[in-house]
Structures are given as C-alpha cells and as structure tokens.
Image: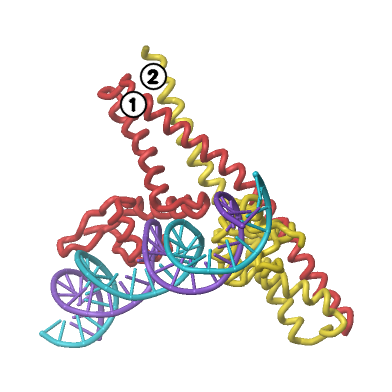
Chain colours: A yellow, B red, C cyan, D purple
DNA sequence: TTATAAGTTAACATTTACGTCAACGTAACT
DNA sequence: AGTTACGTTGACGTAAATGTTAACTTATAA
C-alpha cells in the first residue's frame, strides 16, 4: 500500500498528471503498480526518471520518440549487464552494443556543438544587454 | 536581378522552402525584394538572419512567437540608436529600454541554468558510453 | 521553342504533445 | 454515512509548425 500517488508525482516532477499518464501510455514511463482500487502507485525512481528525461528533452531538444530511442539504448545495456550469462557472446548482442556506442558518441558530439551554439547566443545576448545599458546611461546623463 | 533564390537559401540555412515562406508570412523574416517575375531574391543577410534565429530557437527552446518578441527588442534598440535625436528623453522610451534589459538578463540567467543542465546530460551520456565500452571489452576478452 | 525545373499562392492535412471534459469509481475526512 | 477530493478511462479538442497538393507562372536549357 506504499507509493506516491499521481498528484504528488506531478508536483515533484513539474509535469501535469495528464502528461505523466500520457508518458506511460506511449511507453515512455514504465507502468507503476496499482493499489487495490486501481490507483497508480509510484516510487521515487519514477520521479527521478521523469526529472531526468524532462531535462534531457529540454537540453537536447529531443522529441518524445527520440527520448524513447534513448531509453531503449539504456535498457539494452542494463539487459546486457543482467542477462550476461545467458546471452554472452552472441554476435547479435555485440552489434547492438556497437550501435549503442555509436549513437551515444554521436549525441556527445551534438552536445559539444550545442555548447558552442549556446556561446553564440550568449554573445548576442550580452551585446544586446550592453547596448541596452549604454542607451539607459545616455538617458541618465541627459537629465 | 541579383540575389539568392529560395531554394538556395533553403540549402544554406537548412530550412525548407515552406518554412522560409512561413517565417516571412508571420513577419519573422523581412520580405525580400522580388524579381520581375515575382521570385523572391534574398541577400546573404537573410541567410545569416535565418541561421541566427534557428540557432537561438534551438538553444533557447523559443517558440516562433518568443523569437519575434526578441527580434522586436533588438529592433527597439536599433531604433533607439538611430532615432536618437527624435525620441531622446521620453519616458516611454526609457521604460521600453528597461524592459529590454530585464528580459535579456532573465534570458542570460536561463542560459546559465541551461549550461548546468547540459553538464548533467553530458554526465549521463558519458557514463552510458563507458558502460557500453566496458561491455564491448568483455566481449573481446571472451573470444 | 518546347520540355523541364523551379518559382508563386492558397488551401487543406498532419504531427506532436498535450488540455479539457464527461462519467464514473475510490479514499479521506467529519 | 455523506460530502469532498482525488483517482480512472475515454473521447474529443487544440495550438504550433510545418507537410502536401493543386493550379498556375516564370526561368532554364537542349
């Protein structure tokens, strides 16, 4: 009978209840257990997961579909780790792992680019700010 | 008869022709001159502008409406600079300037936050990459 | 000069990521 | 035991930002 109800999760994650259910519906968020009466009961992990993916979504500009792709990569790796004995050494698994690695490194490159772009925008903003400041100072001087 | 045609601008900016016309339609991109026959003839400046705003859009997560707001701020400042004699000293202009300044500084703060968030995501990605690498190495060792 | 490629407007379609509302069940409080 | 608050599903609505198609015009080039 333990676990957070959806309203609490909404508050902690900053998402709406609608959005949380929607994420579950599209398979982005794993279905939490239900109470006797059918209420969703979330764990802290669910909350952390939501925080993490909303952050990634904003930072990377990911669509929900892209987000899913990424979570799948993560899961592939977890699966690889846990089912190690059973699946070890299959060529299939190796290919999957290599795909994960490629994708992640691609994303890391994109992040680098993103950092550069942020610097550009920051430069523009700073110059805008300075011009605004200068103009204001001229006002003062004229009084 | 000089100037870039829309297809060229699309290539250089990475946007589609539809999008470029749309941006003009909503007043985000200034209407370029037309050729005799009615073709849009763009300058390099148009291309740069498009690059700049798409960058800002991605980096800041701006909607097109927000983007417009921002361009208006910029224009206000340019206008302030050029029509200096005419409008100088009016209280209205000062208020506008202060609003510009406030908004810009707010955006700069957001950018700082955004940088921190990037670092978080980057950390996640790096750990994902390292786990993938480690798993691959285990494959090699088992051969 | 005539096909073909690229431009134009206008209108309708589509996708994403939710918001909103209805009708109903469950928990909590008094 | 009754009221109020919160939960559930399902269906329909919507805003932003394009995609797509049609019908037509203008450049390009063989």
Q: Is residue A99 above or below residue B58?
A: below
Residue A121's label in the rendered image is none
Q: Quadrant of residue A97?
A: bottom right
Q: Is residue A127 above or below residue A133?
A: below
Q: Which residue is mark 2?
A: A139
Q: Is residue A76 visible?
A: yes
Q: Is residue D23 above or below residue B56?
A: below
Q: Which residue is mark 1?
A: B93
Number of marks in picture: 2
**Badge 1, how many Cα within 10 Å: few under 14, some, many 20+?**
some
Q: Quadrant of the N terminus of chain A?
A: bottom right
Q: Residue B55 at what x, y percent from top left?
A: 48, 53
Q: Which residue shows up at 38% across the image and 50% down it?
A: B65
Which element type, helix, strand or loop, lies under badge 2?
Answer: helix
Read off the chain for label 2. A
Q: Which residue shows up at 25% across the image and 24% down it?
A: B86
In this rendering, position of residue A24 left or right of residue A46 = left
In this rendering, position of residue B136 left or right of residue A136 = right
- Whether pointer 2 and pointer 1 mark residues with C-beta atoms closer than 8 Å, the reply is yes
Q: Quadrant of the C terminus of chain A?
A: top left
Q: Residue B90 at what x, y percent from top left?
A: 31, 21
- For this rendering, which residue is in front, B136 or A1? A1
Q: Which residue shows up at 38% across the image and 26% down it?
A: B95
Distance between mark 2 and mark 1 Cα atoms: 9 Å
Q: Residue B141 at what x, y percent from top left?
A: 88, 79
């Amino acid at each position: 009978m333990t676990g957070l109800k959806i309203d609490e999760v909404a508050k902690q994650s900053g998402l709406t209840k609608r959005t949380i259910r929607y994420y579950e519906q599209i398979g982005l968020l794993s279905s939490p257990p239900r109470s006797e009466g059918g209420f969703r009961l979330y764990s802290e992990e669910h909350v952390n997961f939501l925080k993490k993916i909303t952050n990634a979504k904003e930072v990377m500009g990911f669509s929900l579909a892209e987000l899913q792709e990424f979570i799948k990569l993560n899961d592939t790796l977890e699966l690889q780790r846990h089912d190690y004995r059973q699946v070890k050494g299959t060529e299939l698994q190796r290919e999957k792992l290599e795909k994960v690695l490629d994708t992640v490194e691609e994303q890391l490159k994109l992040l680098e680019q993103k950092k550069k772009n942020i610097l550009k925008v920051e430069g523009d903003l700073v110059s805008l700010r300075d011009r605004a400041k200068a103009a204001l100072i001229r006002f003062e001087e004229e009084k």
